[in-house]
Image (tube, rainbow, N blue to C red):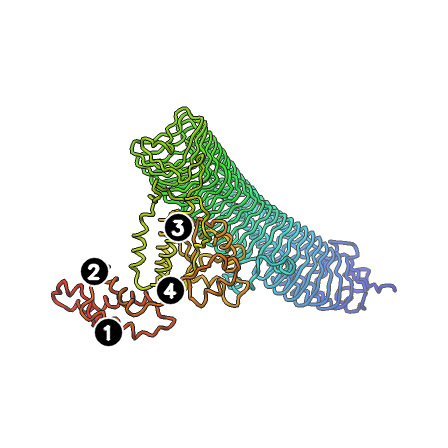
Amino acid sequence: MKRNVLRVADRGWGTYRTVTAAIRAADEGAEIRVQPGEYRESLVLDRDVTVVAERGPGTVRVVAVHGPAVSVNGGSPVLREVTVEGAADRGPAVLLTGGGPLLDRCAVSGGRIEIVRAAAAELRSCTVEDTTGSGVQVTGTARVTVDDCVIRAATGHGLTLSDAASAQVRRTTIERVGGCGIVTAGESAGTFDDCTVRYTGDAAVLVHPFARPLLRGCRLHDSKSQGVRIADTAGAAAAAAPAVDPNAAAAGHEESRIRLEKCEIFRTGEEGVSACAADLRLRDCHIRETGGAGLIASGTGRVELEHTRVVDVPGTGLAVLDTAELRVHGGTVARTGANGVHASDRGTVRLTECEISTTTYTALNIGGGASAVLLGCTVRDSAQHAVRVAGGADLVAEDTRFERTRMTGVDVQGADVVLRRCVISEADTGVRLETGHRPLLEGCEVLRSARTGIEIAAGTGAVVLGGHVDAPGSAGVFLGERSEAWIEDLTISDAKGSGLVIWSGANPRVRSLTVTGAAKNGVYVGDGARGLLEDCDVSATGYPAVYVGAKAAPVLRRLLVHDVDEDLSQADDAEARFEQCRSHDVKVATLPTQAEAGAAGRVVPAMVATAGMAQGGTAGVEADGRDVAGEDQLPALLAELEQLVGLGGVKREVASMAKLMQIVKRRQEAGLQPPPLSRHLVFAGNPGTGKTTVARLYGRLLAALGLLARGHLVEADRSDLVGEYVGHTAPKTTAVFRRALGGVLFIDEAYALVPAGQGNDFGHEAISTLVKLMEDHRDDVVVIAAGYPEDMDRLIDSNPGLASRFTRTLRFDDYASADLVRIVEHQAYQHEYRLGEDTATALLAHFDSIERTERFGNGRTARQAFQQMTEQHAMRVADLGDPSDEDLTVLTPVDVPAAVA
């Protein structure tokens, strides 16, 4: 069917003088061919017609006198190769309110293209320029397809999507605009492929909460602000946003994300990407030459980077603030003017198979309460530290390399760290730990440090399991004053100084250490130091293999020294003890043997004489078999237990276990198999019944028997063990467990780890982690689970591993009223008060009158009663003009709370 053609010319040949007249006369499907000229009119299109400049682009100008030059409210009209100019009233030049219009190779100026309501428009090879406000604005539920267009020289934003609008934009350039290049707001959705946004007065792309744009293969550059800014609108929108599971499957979840794929962001005035309270994913992107940081995640933002490069930025590469979460897989951060990665506040970072290199400041700086995980990463060429973890932060690094850093490879200041199978090479100091936590280094290599390989600073406890320290420029491992390190299966080779330095006041436990090729001593024990060294091997040292300083009192058990000039040097007043030690291929052998004592050392012969490798208990024994390292403390500790108020059944059970463990130890020392024994306990009782006090004494008893290295108590509850998100629980539980190595881990209200009716709670992960750790360190830690009697059975039944490890339950009964009176008497004695005549009787009546409900506090109730009595006593005595010593110290019946009431 032949199309109906209408011709328009403002003068000369033509059927119609105005385009409007032709539109009115046209049938559906008609084509209106417009001759060159300027048509000062406003076109209204509401049917399927085509308006085309007959002589091509630039020959026909439609100029609005007022309002839009072109309006479409229905049909599928086509406007082709027409120049449209808006009126000077700041309104739209083109207003599309309905239908499915197509603008093909048109030029629009003097006003924006506005697409509203339910219109479905298409812009093809169009130019929009010199507009007041936005170049293209899409609102409502409108949809637009933009192909091969140019939007430039708008005083406001280039392209704006808002409400529930959507757009597909391909091969389009947005440039030289006063605001942002692209703005997505409301719940809009836009897909941008192979687009360029450049020379913007604000961010290249601005995303408001709930909008979900997708940019693929785009280039964002030369913006005066950020490349991409994701706004937070004062946090209100973020607070209302639905929670997103960071581990959800990609399907479905991807649609709710802001996504950039294969995009380039460069030469920005500020940071490359700023994400506040957003769920953002970058894949195969490249961020470079920014005006600030490469990327900042803040607020409650969740940002994921996959195979993305952040390089040549003057600030920090990646920054995580507030409670934001950053996950990076296969990424590169290089040549930064500040940190490579910075995390603070309570931000979390997870880096997998990433490379961070050539940073001006510390490569990874983790502070505040931030948490970081590194898996299979490489960190190299930092001008400061490779990693610094400070404050309340924590770091877990596995299979990661830290190379060529001018300061410390891993520097820990007050924070907690776990390093597994990591390599730290060519740092000034390999690893430095100064913290109240108990960091763990497992299977790590520290290679070619300019100074110390591993430094454990004053007052720090750390655990080093396995690994190798090779060719440090000074000491292999330095243990600072009062430090309490736990070292097993470590090799130290070719140290330029001493292999292991135990400084004054340090008290380590070292097992199966190998030191070879040290230029100075293999083991240097400073003045006043202590410690236990078992099954160590020292060889090929430049100085005596072992040096023991003045007043130092280490225990060296089953030490082997060989291939050295001299095996031992000691100060005259050294107090070292040697058990089953031996040496061979030594020119000057002074190491004491079973048959002779050194000048300053004591020799302890083995209960079973062998070639020097007999297995014994962990504490030393004299020839008569009696313990000299602490077993003599048992009577005093048992007496202290007996002095506790009440708890008759508990005291009998603990005393019985102490005797049983004495026999276990004696059998081990005699070379006999010990009977099966679980040292882990359940303490079932109400609050205030003395569970913590007994746990502390139990640890001290085991330490006195030599069955625990220290016997200290570490208290924990659910909040210390259970994380707030997936993957956080196991590291938290492990960190608490490490602090308890050599002592007792006391878990109060342990039943809270398995809340009733919540099968998927993170507490189950904490229990599984505990069970494994208890198996791996069966001889190093005692775990006590405490709580209400009726709830502890539910805890034990929650995991088969618990039932096999907690085979004994001690029941702590509530205190009787007479016991509570004794507690008050003890409190009074400690604070230099005494109970007057009949005061104890009044107290007994007071405690008898208290109803034993869930709120009854046992010992806490007694302490509160004493506090109330002292307060009433103070009020009474303050009114006396000249109180005597008796007035100041005696508590009378009128001071008892019941009497006051």
- Asked if 540 appears above or below 875 in the picture, the reply is above
Please state which of residues 614 and 639 is positioned toward the viewer in this rendering: 614
The numbered dot on residue 812 is 4
Point out the tag, 1 or 4, that comes first from the N-terminus.
4
Residue 655 on image: x %, y %: 35, 56
Please state which of residues 417 and 842 is positioned toward the viewer in this rendering: 842
- Asked if 503 appears above or below 299 in the picture, the reply is above
Q: Secondary structure at mark 2?
A: loop
Residue at mark 1 to residue at mark 4: CA–CA distance: 31 Å
Q: Amino acid at mark 2?
A: Glu
**Residue corresponding to mark 2:** 832
Q: Is there CB contact under 8 Å for labels 2 and 4? A: no
Q: Amino acid at mark 4?
A: Phe
Residue 266 shows in the view: no
Residue at mark 4 to residue at mark 3: CA–CA distance: 26 Å
Point out the tag, 3 or 1, that comes first from the N-terminus.
3
Quadrant of the frame with the C terminus: bottom left
Residue at mark 2 to residue at mark 3: CA–CA distance: 42 Å
